[in-house]
């Protein structure tokens, strides 16, 4: 028995030595393949890389360790980007497996840079551009596989960018912008994951992007809990498809604004003010002079910004709404005592700019849709339909071309809430319609507005 035990031990030692030798050889082969991948355009598929990604059993940890070893002496180059994309799109391996490999390799490059930025490592711009190209040019299954690869590289060892995004950061502006771009580029892949799996962030930034439908908040971590609650409620209540906002900046805290941020964004950027939340505005003192509770000035300024984003995102696809708004403005300008003048300040009506007109009405809708609707319905019951017709344009804007819209209300603590209500439409042709009715207060308020709708 002792002899058998000794023989078994000897065989085990030999097997372990062979296994170690094989693992070392595989590591060297992968390092060589990665070097070739980044050295020049490849004229044919790497057979080794194809075989590697097609293996049924993959040691993810060992693969990522090899990536880390590679980046100690090599950068992620533009050739890595083009060659990896070619392997995904044109290679003979499973494209989803190759995409996962590429996602992990790119994410490892990002992590290595931010862990060693003090040593003067070159910024991995090519890795960011590669991920962005994959996101915009490929189908969902490929994007999901890249996201899985990112998760392979970063879960348990996220990218440390928090120190560069705080208001007291001593990082140069270029490093701050690079950190923001890293957040934005990785963020489009996160899906339902919490961003903390991939990035070490300031508290406000991490919490906000997790809670606010993927919108980034770069505030230097200076906004209060109440400010964050107000902004979160706004982006939870208004669907992303309506506003198209990707990032919020607080320029007074981080010295970067929506206008000067050198970033590639998958949407719009907005600036948020830095002010106390207890500064209030009495909305009943401005047109349409509807009695209602005051709203924090901070929240109202945020609503104004977001409403401009809604206009910029949705109005180009709804030229009919712009044309109808222009008709209402023209009618009001021709009649000194026009009922529509009760809705908006004279300078907006006389500007002749439908986007400004709809943006103003949209803010009223976000602050208290029911209150302004009730006031317009009272005028409609007396025969003055133009104000309600104008508000129906806003309801249509928020309807996403459907038969329901969102009614919003903003509370005095800055919280925005939304509820859905039904719309009624009048069809001018089989494909062209306008809203002429809405459900409110337990009934449908519907009117014949063809006399206005048919005006040129």
Image (cartoon, helix red, strand yellow):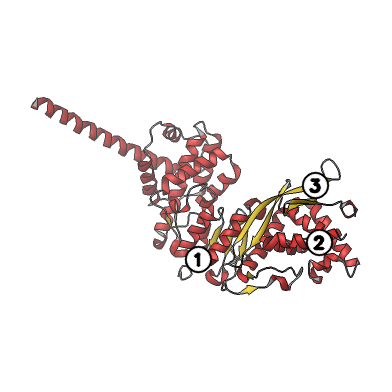
The residue labelled by disc 3 is 425
Q: Could you give the CA–CA distance between mark 3 and mark 1, rounded to whole angstroms? A: 42 Å
The residue labelled by disc 2 is 378
Whole-percent x, y for residue 400 in the image: 71, 49
Say which element carries label 3. strand
Q: Nearer the viewer, mark 3 or mark 1?
A: 3
Front in this rendered view, residue 137 or 420? 420
Q: Could you give the CA–CA distance between mark 1 and mark 2, rounded to whole angstroms? A: 40 Å
Q: Does residue 44 show up?
A: no
Residue at image point 20% right, 31% down: 12
Q: Does residue 330 show up?
A: yes
Whole-percent x, y for residue 390 in the image: 80, 59
Front in this rendered view, residue 314 or 22? 314
Q: Are marks 1 and 2 in contact (CB under 8 Å)?
A: no
Whole-percent x, y for residue 347 in the image: 80, 71
The 10 Å Cα crowd at callout 2, few under 14, some 14 to 19, many 20 or more, is: few
Q: Sequence order check: which comes first, mark 3 or mark 1?
A: 1
Q: Nearer the viewer, mark 1 or mark 2?
A: 2
Image height of 194 relative to 60, above or below: below
The residue labelled by disc 1 is 225
Whole-percent x, y for residue 253 in the image: 53, 71
The 10 Å Cα crowd at callout 1, few under 14, some 14 to 19, many 20 or more, is: few
């Amino acid at each position: 028995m002792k002899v058998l035990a000794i023989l078994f031990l000897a065989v085990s030692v030999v097997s372990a030595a062979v296994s170690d030798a094989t693992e070392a050889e595989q590591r060297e082969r992968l390092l060589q393949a990665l070097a070739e991948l980044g050295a020049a355009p490849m004229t044919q598929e790497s057979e080794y890389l194809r075989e590697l990604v097609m293996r049924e059993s993959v040691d993810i940890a060992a693969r990522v360790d090899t990536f880390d070893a590679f980046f100690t002496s090599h950068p992620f180059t533009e050739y890595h980007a083009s060659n990896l994309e070619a392997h995904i799109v044109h290679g003979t391996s499973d494209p989803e497996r190759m995409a996962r490999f590429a996602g992990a390799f790119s994410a490892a490059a990002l992590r290595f840079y931010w862990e060693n930025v003090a040593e003067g490592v070159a910024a991995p711009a090519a890795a960011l551009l590669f991920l962005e190209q994959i996101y915009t040019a490929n189908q969902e299954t490929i994007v999901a596989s890249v996201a899985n690869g990112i998760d392979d590289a970063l879960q348990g060892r996220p990218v440390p960018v928090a120190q560069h995004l705080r208001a007291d950061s001593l990082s140069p502006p270029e490093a701050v912008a690079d950190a923001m771009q890293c957040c934005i580029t990785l963020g489009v892949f996160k899906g339902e994951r919490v961003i903390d799996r991939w990035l070490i962030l300031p508290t406000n930034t991490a919490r906000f992007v997790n809670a606010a439908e993927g919108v980034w908040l770069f505030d230097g971590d200076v906004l209060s809990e109440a400010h964050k609650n107000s902004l979160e409620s706004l982006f939870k209540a208004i669907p992303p498809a309506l506003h198209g906002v990707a990032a919020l900046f607080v320029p007074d805290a981080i010295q970067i604004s929506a206008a000067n941020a050198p970033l590639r964004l998958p949407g719009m950027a907005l600036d948020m003010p830095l002010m106390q939340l207890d500064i209030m505005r009495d909305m009943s003192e401005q047109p349409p002079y509807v009695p209602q509770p005051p709203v924090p000035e901070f929240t109202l300024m945020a609503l104004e910004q977001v409403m401009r984003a809604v206009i910029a995102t949705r109005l180009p696809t709804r030229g009919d709404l712009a044309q109808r708004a222009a008709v209402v403005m023209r009618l009001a300008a021709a009649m000194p005592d026009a009922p529509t003048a009760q809705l908006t300040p004279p300078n907006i009506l006389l500007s002749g700019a439908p986007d400004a007109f709809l943006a103003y009405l949209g803010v009223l809708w976000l602050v208290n849709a029911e209150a302004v609707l009730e006031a317009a319905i009272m005028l409609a019951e007396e025969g003055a339909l133009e104000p309600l017709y104008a508000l129906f344009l806003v309801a249509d804007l928020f309807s996403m071309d459907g038969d329901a819209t969102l009614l919003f209300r903003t509370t005095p603590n800055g919280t925005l809430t939304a509820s859905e209500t039904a719309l009624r439409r009048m069809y001018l042709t089989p494909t062209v319609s306008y809203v002429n009715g809405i459900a409110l207060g337990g009934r449908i308020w519907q009117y014949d507005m063809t006399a206005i709708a048919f005006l040129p």
